[in-house]
Image (tube, coloured by chain):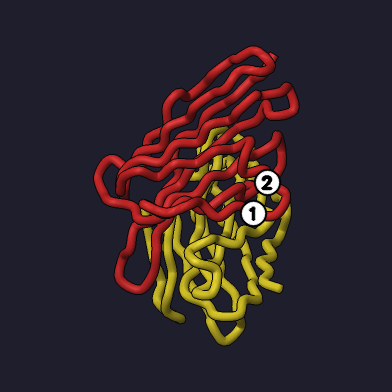
Chain colours: A yellow, B red
Amino acid sequence: EDKVVQSPLSLVVHEGDTVTLNCSYEVTNFRSLLWYKQEKKAPTFLFMLTSSGIEKKSGRLSSILDKKELSSILNITATQTGDSAIYLCAVDDLNQGGKLIFGQGTELSVKP
Amino acid sequence: GAVVSQHPSRVICKSGTSVKIECRSLDFQATTMFWYRQFPKKSLMLMATSNEGSKATYEQGVEKDKFLINHASLTLSTLTVTSAHPEDSSFYICSASKWVAGGYEQYFGPGTRLTVT
């Protein structure tokens, strides 16, 4: 059965810290891995990763995929209170007709 | 990126009535859209996959006669909650898939908060 596991489940840091969120997966026929940020409303898209070793970057956020290790990390540098959110990792399995398999999420809290 | 809208953002209805929620992809065509519901402090729960021009595919345990889905065009899918009951109160979120070299990026609408009294 397809599975996506995120760690840690929750994390509290102070402004300015750097955080690394982890996502590991087991899927039959991997196509891509996606990261989302969810605050009070619906998730907002951050990154889609399809190839190993190629870092995607957007401002203070970056992410990389390791297909050998079946995992991805999301890094946030110089965290701000506005980064407080639930970060969701999801995997697109070719056999699932486009449905995403979501991890449980990591709840990040950034204290001033 | 891409923009997906949902309407209404918030609705309160009486038990026994039906409510329709619209999901639109504003700047791209989406062959496939998805409907989720989310309970407080819980992850997203996929309800159904909606393909343009064909019947929706429902996840196990989701009543297709209660949650009617129509995907009449490449930019619009609707979810109708029929004969709503208080236990249907939830946050309903749609998403739309956009093909970007190598895979599908899935973009979420802002969600609809349904309260059934």
- Please state the chain letter of the residue tagged with numbered disc 1 in the rendered image: B
Residue type, numbered disc 1: Glu
Classify A52 as above or below B7: below
Residue A28 appears left or right of B5: right
Image position, residue B87 (x, y; %): 74, 28
Residue indicated by mark 2: B62
Is residue A110 visible to the viewer in this orientation of the structure?
no
Front in this rendered view, residue A71 or B102: B102
Residue farthest to the bottom? A68
SS at badge 1: loop
**Hey, which quadrant is residue B92 in on the image?**
top right
Residue indicated by mark 1: B59
The residue located at (66%, 66%) in the rendering is A4
Tag 1–tag 2 contact (CB < 8 Å): yes
Image position, residue A67 (x, y; %): 53, 82
Q: How many neighbours does mark 1 have within 10 angstroms: few (below 14), some (14-19), or many (20 or more)?
A: few
The residue located at (47%, 51%) in the rendering is B50
Residue type, numbered disc 2: Val
Give the CA separation, mark 1 to mark 2: 6 Å
